[in-house]
């Protein structure tokens, strides 16, 4: 038996609102498949001494970082149902990848690259759950809105 939070004492338990947007917040295990595939692609591309095709100079390189981590955080947010968790996982993975690149001979690690990783992850995690329901303190069975006054 756990203790109740002092702010919640005597109040109705929180529940998630129902409906179409509430389903966005539910974890979706199948979304882990594309998330892990994106992580594998990022890792393998950063492990290669040269990326396939022409090398990208700044700012095209930063756009690639932004888009890759946008996609990663989008899939992580859909997999976990949590924006914060998706952002933290993507940011840590980006930091680990930048450290990893420091040990790959022709590559270099950069804080600016990581900042674009985090910016893309932030936007991806936000858009993945855009419109997701927020917790409702409304007790079960109460109407969503008060009845409109009749004039």
Image (cartoon, grey):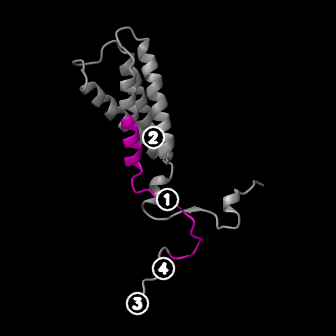
Which residue is situated farthest in the left direction here?
54
- For the residue pair 41 and 7, the one nearer the viewer reads as 7
Question: Is disc 2 in contact with disc 4, using a CB cutoff of under 8 Å?
Answer: no
Q: CA distance from mark 1 to mark 4?
A: 19 Å
Q: Position of residue 103 (x, y in %)?
A: 44, 11
- Local crowd size for mark 3, using a 10 Å CA cut-off: few (<14), some (14–19), many (≥20): few
Q: Which mark is residue 18?
A: none
- Which circle, 3 or 1, is nearer the viewer? 3
Where are the magenta residues, as a range? 119-143
Image point 47% across, 76% down: which residue?
145
Which residue is situated farthest in the top direction here?
105
Mark 1 residue element: loop
Residue 39 horizontal side relative to residue 135, left or right: left
Q: CA distance from mark 2 to mark 4?
A: 37 Å
- Local crowd size for mark 4, using a 10 Å CA cut-off: few (<14), some (14–19), many (≥20): few
Q: Position of residue 89 (x, y in %)?
A: 49, 35
Mark 4 residue element: loop
**Tag 3 residue:** 150
Which residue is situated farthest in the right direction here?
1
Q: Which mark is residue 146?
A: 4
Q: Which mark is residue 134?
A: 1
- Which circle, 3 or 2, is nearer the viewer? 3
- Which circle, 1 or 2, is nearer the viewer? 1
**Compared with residue 150, is residue 132 higher up or lower down, i.e. above or below?**
above
The tag earlier along the polypeptide, 2 or 4, is 2
């Amino acid at each position: 038996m756990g203790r109740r939070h002092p702010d919640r004492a005597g109040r109705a338990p929180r529940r998630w609102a129902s409906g179409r947007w509430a389903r966005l917040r539910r974890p979706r295990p199948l979304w882990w498949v594309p998330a892990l595939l994106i992580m594998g692609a990022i890792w393998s591309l950063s492990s290669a001494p040269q990326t396939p095709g022409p090398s990208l100079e700044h700012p095209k390189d930063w756009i690639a970082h932004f888009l890759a981590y946008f996609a990663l955080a989008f899939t992580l947010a859909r997999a976990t149902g949590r924006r914060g968790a998706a952002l933290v996982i993507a940011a840590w993975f980006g930091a680990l990848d930048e450290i990893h690149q420091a040990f790959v001979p022709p590559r270099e690690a950069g804080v600016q690259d990581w900042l674009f990783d985090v910016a893309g992850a932030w936007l991806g995690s936000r858009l993945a759950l855009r419109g997701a329901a927020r917790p409702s303190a409304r007790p079960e069975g109460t109407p969503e809105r008060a009845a409109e006054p009749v004039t």
